[in-house]
Image (cartoon, rainbow, N blue to C red):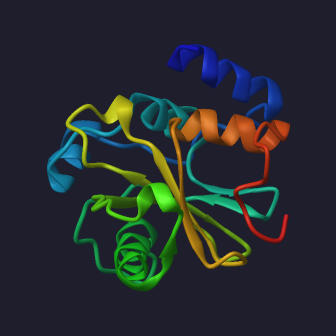
Amino acid sequence: MTGEDELEALRQAMPPTAPSNASVDWDQFGRSWGKEFPSDYCRFIDVYGYGSIERYLAVLKPEPEGTVTENSDMANETEVAREAWSWVRKAPELAEARPELIAWGGDASADLLCWDASDEDPGRWPVLVYNRDDGLWRRYDCGMVQFLVRVLRGGFDECPLGDL
């Protein structure tokens, strides 16, 4: 499935109800983090914006790295995720992994939704989830939009999110 197909699948599962609340200079944003971001994420933000999905799942506001304000969600959650990686259990396939974590979302269960941004190609960044109910990091080999589609459609063998 292409990125456009995935976004269309998401539009079917979750039609946009308002214009995006974000206007992002993606080049400047990428420079601040030292990398380009996945195109599916950029398209998601351009269509939906950031914020809450059904008062459970949140897509974080795209912010330049190093942002320090009261509402600097992406920067703050990335730091939380990087700290949690150092001490939280990991699924066996992640035992030796050294990901470059960037947080893109979270949920009402305080789970962390991140990318492993280690690959130079942002289209290949998998989603890493810290599920606090399980106390475990897991890897999902899909992009952010495909992850959301699969969560909304119940497309995982087990739900990757806690308390759902």
Q: Is residue 129 left or right of residue 124?
A: right
Q: Position of residue 99 (x, y in %)?
A: 30, 58
Residue 37: give x, y in percent of width and height: 32, 40
> In this orientation, does residue 113 appear?
no
In the rendered image, residue 67, in percent from the top left (x then y), is placed at 27, 72
Residue drawn at (51%, 77%) of the image:
89
Q: Residue at x 46, y 77 (%)?
A: 71
- Which quadrant of the figure contains the N terminus? top right
Percent of width and height locating residue 28: 19, 45
Seen from the viewer's position, the closer of residues 103 and 89 is 89
Q: Quadrant of the C terminus?
A: bottom right
Position of 2 compared to 28: left or right?
right
Q: Is residue 34 shown above or below 70?
A: above
Q: Residue at x 38, y 69 (%)?
A: 78
Most foreground residue, 57 or 142: 142
User: In which image quadrant can residue 58 be found?
Assistant: bottom right
Residue most extreme to the front: 92
Q: Work out whether 108 lies above or below 52.
A: below
Q: Nearer the viewer, residue 32 or 87?
A: 87
Please indicate, yes or no, whether residue 119 appears anywhere in the rendered image: yes
Query: Where, by quadrant of the figure, is residue 16 drawn?
Result: top right
| Total marks in image | 0
Q: Is residue 26 above or below residue 136?
A: above
